[in-house]
């Protein structure tokens, strides 16, 4: 079972803002990283650290964190943002790396 | 540009050992700046971290799989490998290899993934 908890599904109207959250004790000590995964493709890193984007990731993607909750925000969601999103972090408990269960984002 | 490519049998019989290799190009697994991980994803399900190897050869494993997993590296070929023993149908999944900076900035490069089916 995931030690990071995500809502299974979220929807957003085209052009609106959506927040996807990730909760877990490890997030009190480590930043979350966020990945976008489209059907049949490998995950792609979209946010890491406090709020950093790899080269090529649009600036409508941003990240934040408070306490045991990390958030991925998409400001002005586009049709191409429809995908599964996963969070992950390091962990100082028995499992060094943990993933959330994933959130399926639907853009209406 | 760093590239990772998984290879290995797509079909493994129950109780046998699953063996996969990840070939890295554009970067060295000997670099002290990265961990090299295996991650899997059953069809329609989420990502599960399996384990990782560091340049020194040190390894860490997911406790839920630790008794069955071995990850090793071959610096001469710039490859690292996964062995998962005593497989069952529950081990059927797409297996990915990925690079994980020691700095903790997320899995920045992934292989395309390879489907391994456990079936007789």
Image (cartoon, coloured by chain):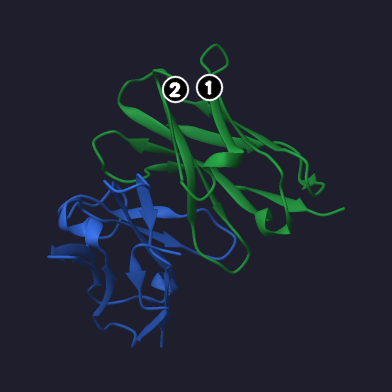
Chain colours: A blue, B green
Whichever of labels 2 and 1 marks the residue nearer the N terminus, that label is: 2
**Residue placed most toward the observer, A81 or A23:** A23
Q: Position of residue B21 (x, y in %)?
A: 63, 31
Up the image or down, B27 lies above or below B51; here it is above
Mark seen at residue B106: none
Residue corresponding to mark 2: B29
* In this picture, residue B70 sits left or right of residue A56: right
Q: Residue at x 49, y 54 (%)?
A: B48
Q: Position of residue B49 (x, y in %)?
A: 47, 49
Name the element at disc 2. loop
Q: Residue at x 31, y 35 (%)?
A: B101
Disc 2/disc 1 C-alpha distance (Å): 8 Å
Chain of the residue on which disc 2 is drawn:
B
Q: Residue A9 falls in which quadrant of the image?
A: bottom left
* In this picture, residue B107 sits left or right of residue A17: right
Q: Nearer the viewer, mark 2 or mark 1?
A: 1
Q: Residue B99 falls in which quadrant of the image?
A: top left
Up the image or down, A34 lies above or below B28; here it is below
Q: Is disc 2 in the same subunit as disc 1?
A: yes
Q: Is residue A25 visible?
A: yes
Specify few, some or many for label 2: CA neighbours under 10 Å numbering under 14, 14-19, or 20 or more: many
Q: Position of residue B15 (x, y in %)?
A: 78, 45
Going by the picture, which residue comes out furthest to the left?
Answer: A66
Q: Residue at x 61, y 61 (%)?
A: B42
Q: Residue at x 24, y 56 (%)?
A: A26
Chain of the residue on which disc 1 is drawn:
B
Pointers 2 and 1 in contact (CB under 8 A)?
yes
Mark seen at residue B73: 1
Up the image or down, A35 lies above or below B4; here it is below
Name the element at disc 1. strand
């Amino acid at each position: 079972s995931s030690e990071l908890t995500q809502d299974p599904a979220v929807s957003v109207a085209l052009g609106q803002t959506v927040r996807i959250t990730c909760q877990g004790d490890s997030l009190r000590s480590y930043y979350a990283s966020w990945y976008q995964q489209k059907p049949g493709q490998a995950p792609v890193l979209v946010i890491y650290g406090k709020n950093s984007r790899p080269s090529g990731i649009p600036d409508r993607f941003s990240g934040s964190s408070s306490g045991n909750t990390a958030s991925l925000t998409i400001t002005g969601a586009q049709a191409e943002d429809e995908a599964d999103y996963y969070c992950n972090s390091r962990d100082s408990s028995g499992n060094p790396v943990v993933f959330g269960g994933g959130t399926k984002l639907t853009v209406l | 540009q760093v590239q990772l490519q998984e290879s290995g049998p797509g079909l493994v019989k129950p109780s046998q050992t699953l063996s996969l290799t990840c070939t890295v190009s554009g970067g060295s697994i000997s670099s002290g700046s990265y961990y090299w991980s295996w991650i899997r994803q059953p069809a329609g399900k989420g990502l599960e971290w399996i384990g990782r190897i560091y340049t020194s050869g040190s390894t860490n494993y997911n406790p839920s799989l630790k008794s069955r997993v071995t990850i090793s590296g071959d610096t001469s070929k710039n490859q690292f490998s996964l062995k998962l023993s005593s497989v069952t149908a529950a081990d059927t999944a797409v297996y990915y290899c990925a690079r994980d900076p020691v700095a903790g900035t997320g899995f920045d490069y992934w292989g395309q993934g390879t489907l391994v089916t456990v079936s007789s």
